[in-house]
Image (spheres, rainbow, N blue to C red):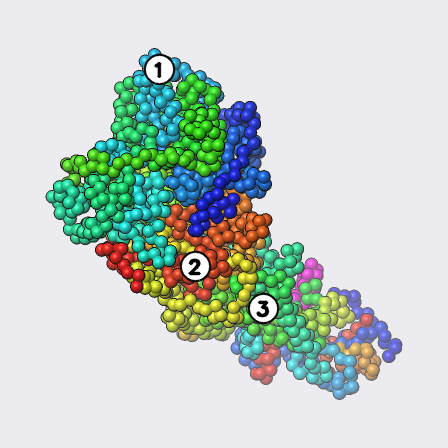
Amino acid sequence: MGRKPAGLALSTGHRMIPGTAQSKEETRARAERAEEPPRLVQGVATFRSITEQISGIVLNRRHPRSWWIGFGLAFLLTMGLFYAISVLLAVGVGIWGINIPVAWGFAITNFVWWIGIGHAGTLISAILLLLLQKWRNSINRLAEAMTLFAVACAGMFPLLHLGRPWAFFWLLPYPNGMELWPQFRSALVWDVFAVSTYLTVSIFFWYTGLVPDVATLRDRAKNRFTRLIFGFMALGWRGSAKHWRNYESAYLLMAGLSTPLVLSVHSVVSFDFATAIVPGWHSTIFPPYFVAGAVYSGFAMVLNIIIPLRKWYRLENVVTEQHLDHMAKVMLATGLLLAYGYIFEIFFAWYSGDPTEQYSVVNRATGPYAPLFWLLLLVNVVLPQSLWWRSVRTRPVLLFFAALSVNVGMWMERFVIVVVSLNRDYLPSSWRMFTPTGWDWLTLVGSLGLFFALVFLFVRFLPMVTMFEVRDLLAKEKGKSS
Amino acid sequence: MKGFSGIYGVMGEFNSEGALREAARSAREHRYEQLDAFSPLPVEGLDEILGRTGSWAPAWVLTGGVIGGLTGYFLQFWGVGINYPFNVGGRPLDSWPLFIPITFELTILGGAVAAVLSLFVLNGLPQLHHPVFAVPGFERVTTDAFFLCILSTDPGFDPLLVRRFFMQETGAVAVTEMRR
Amino acid sequence: MTDRKAKTNSPSGEPRPALPIVEAAVSPEASSRPLWRSLDELTGSEEFWVWARREFPHGAAEFGDGVGRREFLRVMGAALAMAGLAGCARPPQTKIVPYVDQPENIKADRPLQFATAMALGGFGTGLLVRSNEGRPTKIEGNPSHPASLGAAGPFEQAAVLQLYDPDRSRTVLHDGNIEPHGAMLEAVLEEVERHRPEQGRHFRLLTGSVTSPALAAQIEALRATLPAMKWHQWEPISRWSIHQGAQLALGQLAEPDYRLENADVIVSLDYDFLFLAPDRLRLTKAFTSRRRFDQVGFLQPNALLVAEPTLTITGSMAQARLPMAAADMKWLAWTLGAQLGLGPSPARKAEGGVRLWLDTATAALREHRGRSLVLVGPGQDAETHALVHALNQALGNAGQTVVYRQPAAAQPVDHLASMAELVHDLESNAADGIVILGGNPVFTAPADFRLGEKLGRARFSLYLGLYEDETTACCRWHVPEQHFLEGWSDVRAVHGETSIVQPLIAPLYGGVSVHELMAAFLSQPAAQAHEIVREFWRQRLVPDGDFEKRWRQALSDGVIADTATPELGTSTGGGSLPGSARSEETAGQGYEVVFAPDPTIWDGQFANNAWLQELPKPFSKVTWGNPAIVSPAAAQELRVQNGDAIRIRHQGAEVEIPVWIQPGQAARTITLYLGNGRSRAGRVGDGVGVNTYRLRPSSGLWFCRDVEVTRSDRHAELAQTHLHHSLEGRDFFRVLPLTAFAQGKRAEGREPDPEQNQTLYGPASLNTAAYQWGMVINLTSCIGCSACVLACQAENNIPSVGAREVSRGREMHWIRVDHYFEGDPANPQVYQQPVPCMHCENAPCELVCPVEATLHSADGLNQQVYNRCVGTRYCSNNCPYKVRRFNFLQYADTATPSAQLVWNPQVTVRSRGVMEKCTYCVQRIRTAQIQAQEENRPIRDGEVIPACAQACPADAISFGNVADPKSHVSRLKTLASNYSMLGDLNTRPRTTYLARVEWDANPPASPCQRDTA
């Protein structure tokens, strides 16, 4: 770094205090032996050890074989996705199983599902921050990254499902020769605004949180190239008191903004259905019910990602079973909210006295798609009840599968809402089933591939745990104990 | 003071936030005004000691949010109501309840953009070069090192005095003089 | 043209004024044929055709399949080569006379209408054909033609697609090799010479039933040169039993002319007269004229009682319907006769439902002597027909509800016998030269005749056909036939009214007119059809000398005055009732097979017509195929579901065919539609469905008893447009009991429709225009014939999508006819409901479109802007009527030049990825507006007629300005029976329905003794 500081004074300055280094180490070691390790950061942890551990993942070349396998697999699926998309653009949405009346199929199901998953990150970073949940500190970075990637996957689908994808920009308000604006009364336009706002804000939030850690990487980088890259990304962060002051207030404000945002996004998505008159869609409970479902699946996805990662990268000391326990509890709670939503959907249908509404409920439970519906209840409502037991919440393997079942269940729920409502609406003459084609499946699996490929790249090139916040955590724990 | 114009300031290194806090306090007691501190994490209470509290960020965010919201509603009301009116589903042109979601989203967007801008502008970022980077061991400021700096702009600044202050009055583990 | 249509179709029914005449460009020296030879040379003759045939991506089945680069280039190349062909699409080089429009201001954008006629089974239906810049694009009924009265059925309307069919045969073939036209002419002359010495003893002529006077005259002339030749006729759907029955009852061949408008009670025995009768359009109008509850104070509806083996559109209109095996029909007729005191009573007594039905019929007929009518179908034998003729006489109906006329056919014969004789002669080498004029007899002749291989024995065989079909394969010579829109001819309607067949376009594929071919046999190879027909009529139209005037009048009217066949005295030889040996015969316990013409492709001649293949068949809504129709009971016994295949064996023949379980089907009767399973129909029709002719023996042309039916393990996916036939207890289809209707009760739903101001906002009065368009569909008159569906398809350039896409639920029809069943599956109540776009005032689709691609016009149309549509399909999801159609793939065939010729230039051709739907035929509205503006007058009521309303033979669809309280449609909307479908959703549809008025009690004891309380 920089030029050599010149001047005798400096060198004398150094001479006057010999052997500071080791004495420094001793004092700190002593300090640590005195206090028991803080609960949220386990083991003998110092600022240095934590920082080295986390930045090491990014900075040292060698990566566990599991990373290569996982990334390779995800990459293959991503290629599959790109193939499916090329065919789609060349031939048309007719390659999917959609029809009249079921004009929305997998694409919209996947969109809603991914958007839902994308809710955990901001929720953890923003709402838990406002609620002063310290345990969020070691998981929020990963969750935020996951949010970005999920929203990216989600954003892909509304574009692809268009009959003429190349004209997607007609949904954006921009001055044009036709002097036309989007039809602002349509929930789809609301989607455009909600999702793009959400993506933008999430990126800001994520990057802001990243700056001090990137600075750390800059300062610890061994070769010049990485130092340059991270140097630019760090924007010259030097951790001065002024930096920290503005940083903390801005970050807090963004958290404050993100909290209503994250709640609004899935509400708006739910308007796609709630503002339509399709029986099974036209329901006022949708916004809260969708948000609950979103958080539910979001946390499930965080768990599904973080449980393997903490094992592969030996992060058990930072992402403790304590964290898993907390997340499982949030999952359980939102799951119960969702179950409440199911029950009240049925109640409202009955209470509305509208035979078509009532029939749509009956159709879900007894119609051609009934098996799906009951399976959905099993994996989405029944199985997650196991989270009542601490033994499940703190046993990573069990928890992993509980989360998996929730993710599958949430996808099935989106499918039931989208397809099973459409396939039998007002006039029996147009009732018809939806059968997905191979392209439908390839697009779904491919989007999973894209998502995980991005996650793998992220953990390879950026710190997956917020170092400065863990340091802060450490400091606070110490402050408490001393 | 003119003699020291080539100097940016004198930097003392500490190995704990506590030590930093103490040093800052005593620096204030020694009537040093132009102080700056560097740390791998926000140090509680330091701002109060340094006598700089509060931030303009909230004001920025408020403005951004208001601008965003007004834009949102105007865009819709003017766009479909005045600029190019249509009969859509027999709804009146000014169907305001349907304009709420977009207005809301744009409010948030405006606020968030303002927040990020405030962070960079108020912190003077990006700024890839700065004298403090020349300090030996400063790279550890993002790991576990804490620094207190007395700037040469301080009325009572004298390199020798300041260095002596650091070495005798505080637990500085190293002291460095920074050239501009 | 629009104000012409207004005059002819307006409910007020003003008389048509005298017609202006215009002559198309005439250049006498240029005939069309040489031109075509030159084009042949231009395009490299055989190789080109063969290659072009292989490469043109045509036919619905291929739509949506990806087009590779090389294929694409080939197609483009072919398209360029064919450009010359498209260039030839211009009015023929002979005088033709348009139906309407002022000669002085003919504009290129102003289509002309020409009157012509189409023959089906030999009998003509008068048509008006719209011609855009010389291209026939739309076929409509001719209001002044008695067999059409302005209506047109699916067959007539789809003929325009057949005209442009690139699969039509294009060249003369000899033993499969392309020969020049001249070579064929030489062969013909040679053949005639060869037969001359023996006076044509070994020469045979095979035609369908011929009504064309000009052709008949030519045949007579040929007879004069070859006195010993034989003329055979074969129609797979023959009417011989009707004529023969009349012979038995009245002592001479006769064609009954039913006057349904006079009949209070109609009893039909196995006669689907709304579909099978040659004058079905006229009969439909007459029949529904007695169901017009939309006319003020109308309370004198007719009662229809039907006994039939399989549910038909006629049966669906019946008050009392009796499912009964075709083989039992004879017994039923004789029992009915006996109950009415005619003929011996069969030993077997009726009980249960049959008894009830019989008693009702008897009572009703007795009560309405002279105002009732008994009909029997062509599938029943002559004896039964004789009995029924006698019955009508005994009931005093003859002369009232039925009069007898001479048959219109030039030489009515027993087609079966005629064909049998021909086959015998071929077998015994008594015939060695045969000429076949159309009709594809090899495919349609009874299986056991093996006509195909017998033809092989003939030394000379020549076939004049539209396609290179199954018959072509068995004949030495094949001559491409002219489509009726390409050449001059004449044809008689079933009751003799004669029309001149005017061409609208030069032969696209070098077709030869039947008259010119006959002329060749008469050693006049150079004669032109135009001259032949003209000369023929010159001798008949000139009592007052001025032939030109009469000729032009005939052309512009589309029908020649006073040509109806003479009526016969009703009592001629009356009552000589033959005793019947077979009246005791019954269907027995075995399965019975009934053969019926396919509802959409008739006897198979329309198999290559994608519009008709994709037209959903009534009730089953099956497209692209002909499942065997079985009753629920039989399905249970055979353990089959829809689509499961069964094997049917009879007299050594066997077919394997998927089933469709049809409520209302006679328990042990299996109905097979003919005409499917073609092997040489063309790229569209080949291999679609199952060839049931293979099972049709000469011994049982219409039904066979005791066939062997077994379940096969195969399954076929039926391409259906409509899968769920229950009303689910909902109120979108409303029925009013007659008494309630008489008391002026409203057709109320479960919930009242919301008031206009029952919204968050209050009413938004944005429908500002002076004209507010609306539609009313009368559910009582609709017979579910699907004429509207095809009319819409033709008018609006709606593509066919093929079986695969239909089975995926992607059919594109803008208007559909929904069918619902209620009650006992063995004999259900049947409802039809045509559903176009409702053009809701509060359209749910518009609200959800993100790009304003669908929005409301000031005159109340729900518009779809194709250019703006990005294809989110949200509008379709939010449409409670599901009337929106989406181009999931590139459905419109933009690659085949001749397929583009049929497009209506006034309607955009939609590309992949955009939504489309019914527009109320906005192009017709705008045309009328322009016309009205030019003439500085308001648009007249009934001046704007959407294609569906125009084609409807039952006048079930009314359209007009709802802002004008005096308009017809406004008046209908004030009726008590008027209701909005799903109106409780506050969509405020502009298309409303008149509830179906039903008899309170089935069956009615006495329909006409009702007081208007």
Residue at left 31%, top 46%? C260
Specify the segment rendered in magenta: A213-231
Q: Label 3 amino acid?
A: Asp
* Residue A59: percent from left, percent from top: 63, 62
**Real-space Cα separation, disc 3 to disc 2, in angstroms:** 35 Å
* Residue C36: percent from left, percent from top: 52, 26
Residue B94 got which mark? 3
C786 to the left or right of C64: left
Q: Is residue C29 above or below residue C972?
A: above
User: Mark 2 = which residue?
Assistant: C971
Q: Is residue A43 above or below residue C972?
A: below
Residue farthest along the left direction in this orientation: C347
**Real-space Cα separation, disc 1 to disc 3, in angstroms:** 88 Å
Q: Chain of mark 3?
A: B
> Which of pointers 3 and 2 indicates the residue nearer the eye?
2
- Circle 2: element type: helix
Q: Quadrant of residue C472?
A: top left
Quick check: marks 1 and 3 in contact, CB under 8 Å?
Answer: no
